[in-house]
Each structure stands twice: as C-alpha cells, then as structure tokens.
Image: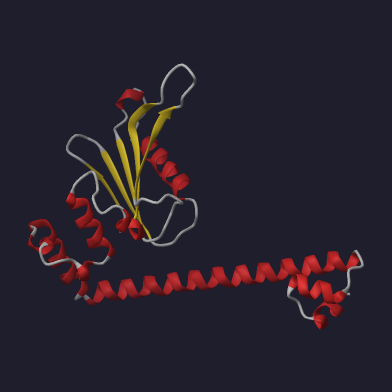
Amino acid sequence: MDIVATTDNGTIVNIEMQCINDGSIVDRASFYQARLRTQNLNEGEDYSDLPDIISIWITGYAATSRKACFHEIVDMYKDNGVDPIEVASEKMRQFIIELPKLKNMPKHPLSEMFNIWMNFIKNPGRLPERFLEIKEVAAAMSELRMISGNKEVWDNFTARQIEMNKWHASNRASYKRGREEGMVQVARNLLRLGVDINQISQATGLSIDDIRKLS
C-alpha cells in the first residue's frame, strides 16, 4: 500500500512500499517527487509557494550497494574549491529504507520507534512482546489481525500475488528467450568467421546439432 498524505503544516509525504527490484529506485523517486511538485503548484502561484515534499521508499530488498538500511537524499551544492559542501534545499527530501539491512543499524539516530515500525512492516509476527505494549503498535497489530481475517481482503491479496508470480514468470521467460536468441546470433557470427563448431558450442552452450542447423 502506497500513501500520499498532507500534514497539518502543508508538507506532502509520499510513502512507497516496494517488493520488486527494478533497479531504478532513485530515478523513480526523483520522478515521483517532480510529479508531486507540478501537481501542487497552480497557475499564477509563486515557486516559493511550493510545499515541502518528503518521499519515503521502503523496500523489501537490497535496493542500493550501501551497507546501512537508512539513506537520505537531498539537493547539495558540491565542493567547488572555494565553498564547502552544503545542502541546497530541503524542500524535496528523499529517504530510502532497505528492510533487509535493518540489522546493520541496531541503533537508529532518529528514535527507537523507527526500528519498531520497520520491524513491524518486515515481520509483525515476530515482534517482541514489549513492543506490543506500545499503544500505537498494539492498535496497528489489532488492525492487521482484523484485515487478515477479512475474506475479501485476502482474495484481493491472493489475486495480487498471482499477478506478481505471472509477472516474474513472464520476465524469466523473456530473459531466457532473449539470451537464447543472443547466443544463436553469436553462433551465426562465429560461423561466418570460420570458428570450429566445437568451440562455438563451448562458447554459446548450444548443441553441435543446433549449430549445424544454423550453418
């Protein structure tokens, strides 16, 4: 579930939950923020009227090559040899939270509640009992149990899982087909160069018979 909310002071908060790694999370986050900015500036308004926008991307996979689970991205002035590195603007802030790396940051600089909520999202069934004594966490757990017992919700969840499985299977099939087509083209090129069929088979993984058919 993704959420776009506006706080009491007008700040827009966009929370994105990501299960599938498409390798473009930073670019996508920037695009989503740019779209939010254009949607929240009406004709005739000054650019200074733009609201602050905070994007929070929570991933169930390792989205970056960084070691920690928590990363903040802001516009920066780079070091130019005269001026130091400085934050240019905090009107557009991006946060990436990688759940598999939570163990790398046992003490988050924000608060203990960060770790509690991230662990709740990651695996609510394994929360320590002391966490469930917190009013907000207990309320969230109660809501989760209610939703878990709702047949309509579970039917929708199951349908979504089926679609995701189909999407993954289609991607795997496309990758396999593309790889095979690529190897066939490589084999054709090597045949034109007069490379021995046995060597072509070793290089491409194609069978001797398949390569002979190509020739």
Q: Residue furthest right?
A: 194
Q: Residue furthest top?
A: 82
Which of these two is toward me, 13 or 118? 118
In the image, residue 32 lies at what x, y percent?
A: 41, 44
In the image, residue 117 lies at what x, y percent?
A: 21, 56
The image shows a total of numbered marks equal to 0
In the image, residue 107 lies at what x, y percent?
A: 23, 50
**Left or right: 186 as drawn, with respect to 94:** right
Which of these two is toward me, 166 or 96? 96
> In percent of the image, x 41 and y 40: which residue is there?
35
Q: Which of the image's four quarters has the N terminus?
A: bottom left
**Left or right: 41 as drawn, with respect to 183:** left
Q: Which of the image's four quarters has the C terminus?
A: bottom right
> How are the colours assigned in the image?
secondary structure
Residue 78 versus residue 147 in the image, above or below = above
Which of these two is toward me, 41 or 168? 168
> In percent of the image, x 40 and y 60: which residue is there?
61
> In percent of the image, x 77 and y 80: which residue is there?
207
Residue 31 versus residue 200 in the image, above or below = above
> In percent of the image, x 42 and y 49: which residue is there?
66
Which quadrant holds residue 51? top left
**Left or right: 143 as drawn, with respect to 47:** left
Which quadrant holds residue 102? bottom left
**Left or right: 196 as drawn, with respect to 204:** right
Which of these two is toward me, 193 or 160? 193
In the image, residue 72 lies at what x, y percent?
A: 35, 41
